[in-house]
Image: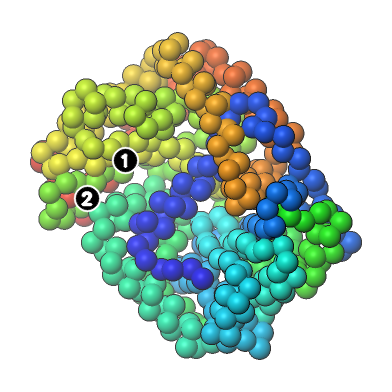
């Protein structure tokens, strides 16, 4: 069951997941992981990592097309649907469905992002048939009972009210509106109070019919199940979904980044700033070099250049960071900083200086070597659970990466040369394009709405 608390925290979690899935993080094969391609009798495909060490199975399923396909005036539809898919299905109302899950210790969660709608199922092997039966009915016969719809709507609206005063959420919404003024990416995944209030039961039913189709489905499985057993289970679980969907394609977008700074006044002692420019697609041959450069710039925590220059050397901010987000239809290179109001302008000036310095000079030899050492050495940590494994399996399929990527990916990191890093930094990074939103009472920055 999805819990609607702070949207800012949910967004941070989603972003963290996206970064884990989409960036190269390791060196050589992390461990001996065997991936099997399972073809069901009915033609469904799943990637499976069999693991009988524990009697558990985890399944990740993802449907292409998320909140970016919400109808005009109904932003938040996919997000709201994600909270309702386990709130009653088939002949079970919400309480009955949740009791069935709890009785067999089955975890079933749904989520929505800008580009996808999906979820995760985790169960003991002995309850796999029961778990998949509940997943099937949730996907094929969600009820959207009025009581459940209004309860979840109330939770979403409460979260929206809470985040009206959340500086991080305010900054994020404003930045995406500025970066994508004429594209669905400019809308918040969670919608607005007005758009959420406009969502009807019929909208939710139409969403499920249109989005949950086999041609949009990607599946990753890990745990105590064999390919022979899994194949027929795929058909039993997903085979009754419609074969295709007539949803429109989401258009590609251009990031509008003009170097402007927008200040949104809020009576807080510390300001939050979010900045960004156009990024790089995951399919771009320069992706690996760009990721290494970003790690050095602001993705490496306390080892990053921004952290060293902004926090450690000058004490201007508690946190400062950058990250790459390759959405399906646009890519952004973003970052953030939080600092007291008197030091916002100085912090942003220094960030732009470091952005420009990286573009003109690239990293040092030591920075490049250290980044590659960390990124290759960290890969084994990403396989610490079946949940982490299935997320990687789904992401690889969505990105068109072969199974051999698990063995080969660190070679791509090691292959990044100083010339590559310098070229890619010069190609992509433009300090003059960094578009910034500041929420707070920053001194020395003009206020705009």
Q: How many marks?
A: 2
Q: Is residue 421 visible?
A: yes
- Residue 355 in view: no
Q: From the viewer's perspective, tell me whether residue 104 is left or right of residue 6.
A: right
The spot of residue 316 in percent (x, y) is 18, 32
Where residue 206 sits, quadrant-wise, is bottom right
Q: Position of residue 237 (x, y in %)?
A: 75, 69
- Check residue 439 in the rendering and tell me which mark sits there, or answer none: 2
Q: Which residue sits at x=63%, y=50%? A: 386
Q: State the CA–CA distance, disc 1 to disc 2.
A: 12 Å
In this rendering, is residue 318 above or below 355? below
Classify 63 as above or below 203.
Answer: above
Residue neighbourhood size for the residue with mark 1, other residues' Cα within 10 Å, grouped as few (<14), some (14–19), many (≥20): many
Residue 336, labelled with which disc? 1
Q: Position of residue 202 (x, y in %)?
A: 56, 83
Q: Residue at point 50% right, 30% down? A: 291
Query: Dot 2 lies on which element?
Result: strand
Task: Classify residue 305 by image quadrant.
Answer: top left
- Which x, y percent locates residue 61? 65, 59
Q: Secondary structure at mark 1?
A: strand
Camera-nearest residue between 170 and 105: 105
């Amino acid at each position: 069951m999805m819990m609607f608390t702070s949207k800012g925290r949910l967004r941070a979690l989603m972003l963290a997941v996206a970064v884990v899935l989409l960036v190269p993080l390791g060196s050589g094969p992390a461990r001996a992981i065997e991936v099997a391609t399972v073809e069901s009798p009915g033609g469904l495909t799943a990637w499976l990592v069999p693991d009988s060490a524990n009697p558990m199975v985890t399944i990740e399923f993802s449907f292409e097309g998320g909140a970016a396909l919400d109808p005009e005036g109904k932003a938040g539809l996919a997000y709201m649907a994600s909270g309702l898919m386990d709130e009653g299905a088939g002949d079970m109302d919400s309480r009955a469905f949740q009791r069935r899950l709890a009785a067999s210790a089955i975890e079933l969660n749904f989520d929505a992002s800008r580009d996808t709608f999906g979820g995760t199922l985790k169960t003991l092997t002995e309850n796999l048939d029961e778990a998949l039966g509940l997943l099937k009915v949730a996907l094929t016969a969600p009820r959207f009972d009025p009581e459940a719809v209004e309860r979840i709507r109330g939770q979403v609206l409460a979260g929206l009210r809470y985040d009206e005063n959340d500086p991080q959420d305010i900054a994020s919404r404003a930045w995406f509106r500025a970066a994508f003024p004429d594209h669905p990416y400019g809308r918040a995944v969670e919608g607005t109070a007005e758009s959420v209030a406009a969502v009807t039961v019929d909208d939710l039913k139409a969403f499920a019919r249109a989005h949950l189709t086999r041609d949009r489905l990607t599946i990753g499985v890990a745990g105590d199940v064999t390919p022979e057993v899994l194949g027929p289970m795929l058909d039993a679980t997903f085979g009754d979904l419609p074969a295709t969907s007539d949803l429109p394609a989401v258009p590609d977008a251009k990031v509008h980044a003009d170097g402007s700074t927008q200040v949104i006044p809020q009576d807080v002692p510390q300001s939050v700033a979010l900045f960004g420019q156009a990024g790089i697609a995951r399919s771009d041959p320069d992706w690996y070099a760009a990721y290494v450069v970003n790690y050095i710039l602001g993705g490496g925590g306390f080892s990053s250049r921004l952290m060293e220059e902004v926090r450690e050397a000058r004490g201007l901010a508690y946190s400062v960071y950058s990250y790459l987000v390759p959405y399906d239809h646009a890519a952004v290179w973003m970052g953030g900083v939080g600092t007291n109001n008197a030091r916002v302008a100085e912090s942003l000036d220094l960030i732009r200086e470091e952005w420009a310095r990286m573009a003109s000079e690239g990293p040092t030899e030591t920075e490049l070597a250290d980044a590659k050492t960390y990124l290759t050495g960290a890969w084994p940590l990403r396989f610490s659970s079946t949940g982490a494994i299935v997320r990687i399996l789904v992401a690889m399929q969505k990105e068109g990466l072969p199974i051999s990527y698990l063995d080969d990916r660190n070679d791509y990191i090691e292959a990044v040369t100083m010339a590559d890093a310098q070229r890619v930094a010069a190609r992509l990074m433009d300090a003059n394009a960094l578009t910034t939103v500041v929420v707070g009472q920053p001194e020395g920055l003009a206020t705009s709405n």
